[in-house]
Image (spheres, grey):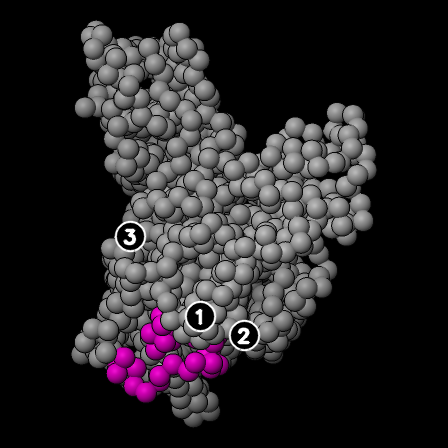
Amino acid sequence: MADKGTAASLVTGNALAGDNYLNHTKGLRSWLFTLDHKRIGVMYLVSILASFLLGGIFALLMRTSLLSPTKHIVSADTYNQMFTLHGAIMIFLFIIPGIPAALGNIVLPLMLGAKDVAFPRLNLASYYCWVAGAIFSLLSIVLGAVDTGWTFYTPYSTTTNTSVVAMTFGALILGFSSIFTGLNFIVTIHKLRPKGMGWFRMPLFVWGLYGTAIIQVLATPVLGITLLLLIVERTLGVGIFDPALGGDPVLYQHFFWFYSHPAVYIMILPAMGVISETVSVFSRKHIFGYKAIAFSSIAIAAISFLVWGHHMFVSGQSNLAGMIFSFLTFLVAIPSAIKVFNWVATMYKGAIRLDTPMLYVMSFLFLFGIGGLTGLFLGSLAVDVHLHDTYFVVAHFHYVMFGGTVIAFLGGLHYWWPKFTGRMYDEAWGRIAAVLVFVGFNATFFSQFVMGSKGMPRRYYNYLPEYQIYHQISTIGSFVMGIGFIIIAVYLIRSLIAGKPAPANPWGGATLEWQTTSPPPHDNFALSPEAGDPYDLEAFRWDAAVGGYVKKSDAAVAVG
Amino acid sequence: MSLTTRLLDLLAGGVQSNPDGGFWMPEAASTGAPAVDNLFHFILWLSVFFFALIVGLMVLFVVRYRRRAGREEPEPSPNHNVALEVTWTVIPLLLVFVIFVWGFKVFLDLNTPPANSYEVLVTGQKWKWLFTYPNGHVDENLHVPIDTPIRLVMTSEDVIHSFYVPAFRIKRDVVPGRYAKAWFRATKVGEYQVFCAEYCGTGHSDMGTHVVVHEPGGFERWMTEVADFLNKLPPAEAGERLFKARGCAQCHTVDGGASVGPTLKGVFGHAVTLADGKSVTADEDYVRESILEPQAKVVAGFQPVMPTYKGKLKDQEITAIAEYMKTLK
Amino acid sequence: MSDTHSPHLAHHFDSPVQQFESGKLGMWIFLATEILLFGGLFCAYAVYRANHPEIFVYAHRYLDKTLGGINTAILIGSSFTMAWAVRAAQLGRQRALKVLLALTIACAFGFLGIKFVEYEHKWKEGLLWGKRYAPHAEGRAEPAADPAAAVAATPPAGVNAEEHTLIPPPARGPAGLAVSDHADERLHLEQEAPKNVQVFFSVYFAMTGLHGIHVIAGMALLGWILLRASRGEFGPDYFIPVDLAGLYWHLVDLIWIFLFPLLYLIH
């Protein structure tokens, strides 16, 4: 108790001056070979944010080039490579590992009151698989950047002379990374829950990660075999997808989407989990309809495996197949709708604080609402024929993945930032940036709905002049969004040095991660915490002396 | 139109499709388009309703229940309500079921050509569409008569393309190795844009052409005129038309610019250096050989990638192209 | 208050039981991913076999049922020795454990050796996948499958084909190599050689090749386990690695048990 830092941490719950996972051991090696889930999570976080920056630069270059229908800053081939790299980097390097492997890695064991994930070595292996996959993917830029689109459709991908093999091999290794994370999370959730945490006492973020992990484990191997077949097709001429050799190129699409449609739920399910946590905490109210939200995560995970065919309504599959896939696609809309209603109902009669994470929650409900509802257009067979492969699909996808997942990721990043770093960020700038991103996003992508339904096909380098106004609005919006992200980067980095020390529980959350210091110690908890209702927010009250929330029972003990 | 479809159209409640397309849709010029537009607008208004409901409630709650001085704690309210939760599960379920059935019925109509359709063969290749009519005429634009069901039988020479006519609301992937089918019945005279909607490489965004819808009788007039152009036009002009219509212009420029293949400006009658170092004079025989056996004498500096036109161009057509080349000085 | 601290208990687990159950669950999930990995190939098999049963019926005769059968027996035998090895580890019979693991690995070598012989035959006869399919015929030359030519052979506009026909490449089945005792049947086969026989061999090499890679990975895994067993690391208190490696090995065998009838025993 002589340690000044430890003494301070007992009062406020801030451990920056004392022993914490960031300063527990020192030196580069202690990070590179760490088995601590928090450090692995931090390495993941830094890596995926770097990927996001790279993918974002490609996006802005594309948008700039599209300001004019025919005058460009890049050549057609370069443009094609840029949209491929934008897609592949954002999907495989950023958004799939985004919430599970970065945020989830740090938060999951904390939420379970555990010391680590079940297989720490596998966790580190997952990170290095990510690194290796990233190296191969980026190597493909040097070797002649891939120009196939991130979907690698055959036979284009087997005939183009760009480095498809390097990129797909990279994606294959990234698949291993994803499988390892998913496997680890399933076992962790099954076996490492603390006393008192039955399945329906788990925080909903854990339910989200659980659904995600199931998809990661069951869908990713199919992507693996698909990419392997593509690689041997290119290198050895196996011809399973080559019509000239009796193969079927549409089979590739079936395989690809058997993974890649569930994969969008790998991206959105944990995002929904983040929203479930934050909407409750910032409304100061118990989540509404806990079981419905939990079961809907699992329902989404299950149905997501049966809807892949809706990507092929115009590929020439039979009417019967179209009918079945369309029907199942509408079914998968229901659990998402249930979640949205529950989140709104949670706010009813709450005491809503409009801190930055809550702004992202509102932003999410608005954008994901549009993203989800526009899915109805695409799920409907007749309308999809017109909208398929137009900017309408691009806009829908970005509303769900960016407006949904990335916004929730940002919300989660701000929500847990004090826990990860022990510092508070600048709240005023946080709100300004949240609004800028929201406004810029809508300008960028809403205009794409309109031009898409007017017939503008996607992946177009030149376009007809009648679409120019929509493209210009879109490009200006993307710049606004870019400025928003620069602001976020600046104040978050600044907070690491100059941020106010964060208390253990700045927002008043009832999940277990808020019951350890900020940042947590190497072993997460000084004493194994007892799990209660994760949304019993009334057990906590604001303490001005601490600058954060404290447990009412603890305070009573202290007073007593 | 079946009774159910009629009922569903009624359900669309007065949002009858606008032939100009309105804010959202492009111009509508086929019999299939209004059905699609009706459904589109039905889903649109349904979505607007639910969106307004969700965002409206969210904003209302944020304003009303914002935490402020004197309102630090939430008011007690239940954590779940079975009746409410069942309601907001069942109502959306019924609504999406309506959308599903409606979408499927219109889809079947879009996919089922009438028996007496006029058939046009469509070939997609990087990066051009070619249309072959029953009499053997090949054109780079799709000419069709108004108010006639047209059935398209489509195939690809290389990678996957997708035939897309926004004004008709039809789209179909054209996959190599199999035949893709689509049909439409145009309702308005005019020219409509055709796009390639499946990414196919460098020239993907330029792989566009037009559907030309003729007034009654106009199509037959056009057909008699073009079908006989070899005999009616001077050979050089006929050659120019073939040059543009049959895919030559995709790889050969006529203004001296570089492309996939050598430019044809100022080539005829002059010596050409070949890949093996030899030289040959570009006369009628060489032109003919290069069209029928493109790999025989490849010009230095170019890849041997040109497909053969053996069986695709008649003698008279080759002669016309050679005549056209003579004019490119 | 902690249990007797086994040196094998990782710090983040509360008890050896929890650790053992975690490892076992993790392995089962991993096996599920393996099944799905092969699942893709089984789907491809099902699609092509359903669409072109004649190719499979025709081409499977070029596989050697006897060698395949011996290999099946070898793998089943190795599963038996593996299961026995796990038992030996649980009972702490060190010598039996080492012998049984060595036997399992020996079986794997035997399997790969026979597989090599089969592959070599196919290689010599040109019965290879897709583009490399160029069967040597007795007495007459067979045109090799040439994808460029096949693309050019796309039915030109003007052909009014009705159904989804796959473009016929010029490749034909290997005449004169049919393994058959009856000359009549052999003649029949020659005439009936369907199009796109290479599809069968593409599927065959993809499936058995991926399986072969898994056998090699299993051998490496078992080799490592044998090494640790020879150091006496396993016993009644700690046999998780042997158990998990065993599970993996059984899966590899199981996949072969599906591959053998699907590829060799078609009717």
- Viewport quadrant of the C terminus of chain A: bottom left
Q: Position of residue B46 (x, y in %)?
A: 33, 80
Sort mark 2 into few (<14), some (14-19) or many (20+) by Cα contacts within 10 Å: many
> Disc 3 versus disc 1: distance between alpha carbons?
36 Å
User: In the picture provided, is B215 more to the left or to the right than A133?
Assistant: left
B28 in magenta = yes
Residue type marked 2: Ser
> Disc 3 versus disc 2: distance between alpha carbons?
33 Å
Q: Position of residue C203 (x, y in %)?
A: 35, 28
* Front residue (pair B128, B7): B128
Residue shown at the point (42%, 60%) measured from the top left: B171
| B185 in relation to B283, above or below | below
Decide whether the magenta segment is chiefly helix, strand or loop: loop
User: In the picture provided, is A476 more to the left or to the right than B271?
Assistant: left
Per the image, label 2 sits on a secondary structure element best described as helix
Q: Which residues are magenta?
A: B9-38
User: In the picture provided, is A434 more to the left or to the right than C210?
Assistant: right
Residue type marked 3: Ser
The image quarter in which residue C107 lies: top left
Chain letter of the residue beneath label 2 in the structure image: A
Q: Position of residue A146 (x, y in %)?
A: 59, 45
Q: Earlier in the sequence, mark 3 or mark 2?
A: 3
Residue shown at the point (81%, 37%) measured from the top left: B270
What residue is pinned by disc 3?
A: A318
* Front residue (pair C7, A417): A417
What residue is pinned by disc 1?
A: B217
What residue is pinned by disc 2?
A: A447
What mark, if any, has residue C90 been given in the picture? none
Residue shown at the point (41%, 10%) measured from the top left: C140
Q: Nearer the viewer, mark 2 or mark 1?
A: 1
Per the image, label 3 sits on a secondary structure element best described as loop
